[in-house]
Image (cartoon, rainbow, N blue to C red):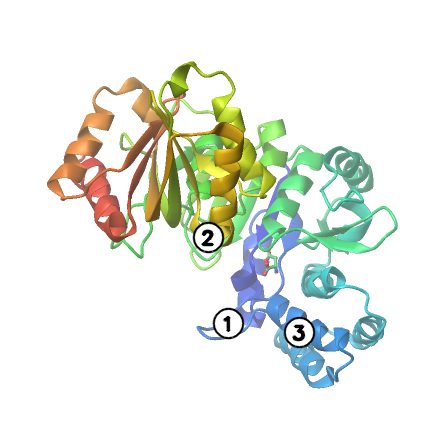
Amino acid sequence: MKKVVKFGGSSLADAGQFQKVGEIIRADKDRRFVVPSAPGKRFDGDKKVTDMLYGCYALAEKDQDFSKELKEIRSRYDEIIKGLSLKLSLDEEFRKIEENFKKKAGVDYAASRGEYLNGIIMAEYLGFEMIDAAEVILFYDDGEFDPEHTNRRMAKRLAGVQNAVIPGFYGAYSDGRVKTFSRGGSDITGSIVARALKADVYENWTDVSGFLIADPHIIKDPEGIETITYRELRELSYMGASVLHEDAIFPVRREGIPINIRNTNHPEDEGTWIVESTCQKSKYTVTGIAGKKGFCSVNIEKAKMNSEIGFGRKVLQAFEDYGISFEHVPSGIDTLTVFVHQDEFIDKEQKVVSAIHRLASPDSIEIEADLALIAVVGRGMKSTRGTAGRIFSALAHANVNVKMIDQGSSELNIIIGVENADFETAIRAIYDIFVTAKL
Ligand code: ASP
């Protein structure tokens, strides 16, 4: 068996956490390939090393003195080295980093050093080979990740390797310049490594025991999700359930490799399994509930819109022209509503409105702000009658006015639009009906 294990920043924040990680890896000899993040927060109010690196490099870029900031970063690593009683010196590495910062090697290079240095320590601690991610993860010149080239390069490099540490979060352009993924991107690295190895499992170790049915800030002690499909997870993470980077499922999905989300501080918990497909029924009709606030709806009315070919395209063109992505587009006979992120839209709203007038000649346009979208997701909904009915009666009883309903034909999710102010009440009502009352 081959397992790829990725550890997040809080799992590697200090020497004590490193020791827990060491125990987890040594407990299972199949845990052969390790992807570390940079050291995260040790306590509330602490700083992540990645953020410290961004701050330090910002000074370097302005030709200001950054020696104090770099020293603080160095002390985070030295503390870990000392706590683990390793005989490792990062003198040479920090000399190079300082030199490259002075040469303005780039913000991505700077941020990537968090994972790179943690990789060196991890490899030394475990006695594994360290493989620099810049050698095996490749980006196109336009900054997009190059999956196929990477997969070939990674598979070739790892062939015959028994154990290795591959730092998360970054790779390189073809000319060798470092490029990072977006924040939280070590999850993607783990998935890329698992794909290249055709691993049996991708274990993603973090500080929670998997996904919860709903946000614990809204529901007190919500139940965990045992098994979730990739597609369900896509819907939930898009709507704000943020345990795993939303792009992390794509590489493993191609090979049907399951992801197991685990808790470094509670390794005895089974966590959540993310799988391609399963005959395991989820415990409740819904697998998860997630949502986001801060949307606007742009309601466009035009008599006989339904028979005008190209109307939808012209309206959406106006949004595209101003670089605004839309979230949902429910439509009626004479109306089309476009849901957009309020913060992206607000500065450009009048320009978009006049573009819609110019391109599609509608009768009227009305904008409504401060809306929230809630996704109720579950593979079980397909075979259960009355799910929508139960959701809406629960919302009615909770006095929540539903502003929009959108159910895709996959029957995997129902999206509901409510006012921002009703967001928490709505989530509680839906959770109660399916989980607490088990209806
Ligand atoms: N260290 C990076 C961040 O803080 C990447 C990661 O942890 O996945 O975003």
> Real-space Cα distance between discs 3 and 2?
43 Å
Q: Are marks 3 and 2 in contact (CB under 8 Å)?
A: no
> Real-space Cα distance between discs 3 and 1?
13 Å
Q: Is residue 313 above or below residue 168?
A: above
Side of 30 where 225 appears, left or right: left
- Which quadrant of the figure contains the N terminus? top right
- Residue 141, label in figure: none
Residue in the picture at 56% in, 61% down: 9
Q: Looking at the image, is mark 2 or mark 1 nearer the viewer?
A: 2
Q: Report the amino acid beneath label 3.
A: Tyr
Q: Is mark 1 within 8 Å of ligand 1?
A: no
Is any part of residue 235 visible from this angle?
Answer: yes
For the residue pair 81 and 76, the one nearer the viewer reads as 76
Is any part of residue 282 visible from this angle?
Answer: no
- Residue 77, label in figure: 3
- Secondary element under disc 2, as helix, strand or loop, is helix
Q: Looking at the image, is mark 3 or mark 2 nearer the viewer?
A: 2
> Real-space Cα distance between discs 2 and 1?
37 Å
Of mark 2 and mark 1, the one earlier in the sequence is: 1
Residue in the picture at 76% in, 62% down: 109
Which quadrant of the figure shows ligand 1? bottom right
Q: Which residue is mark 2?
A: 346
Crowding around mark 2 (Cα neighbors within 10 Å: few <14, some 14 to 19, many 20+) is: few
The image position of residue 362, as x and y in percent, is 42, 30
The image position of residue 136, as x and y in percent, is 79, 45
Rendered image quadrant of residue 401:
top left
Q: Which residue is mark 1?
A: 42
Crowding around mark 1 (Cα neighbors within 10 Å: few <14, some 14 to 19, many 20+) is: some
The image position of residue 65, as x and y in percent, is 75, 85
Q: Report the amino acid beneath label 1.
A: Arg
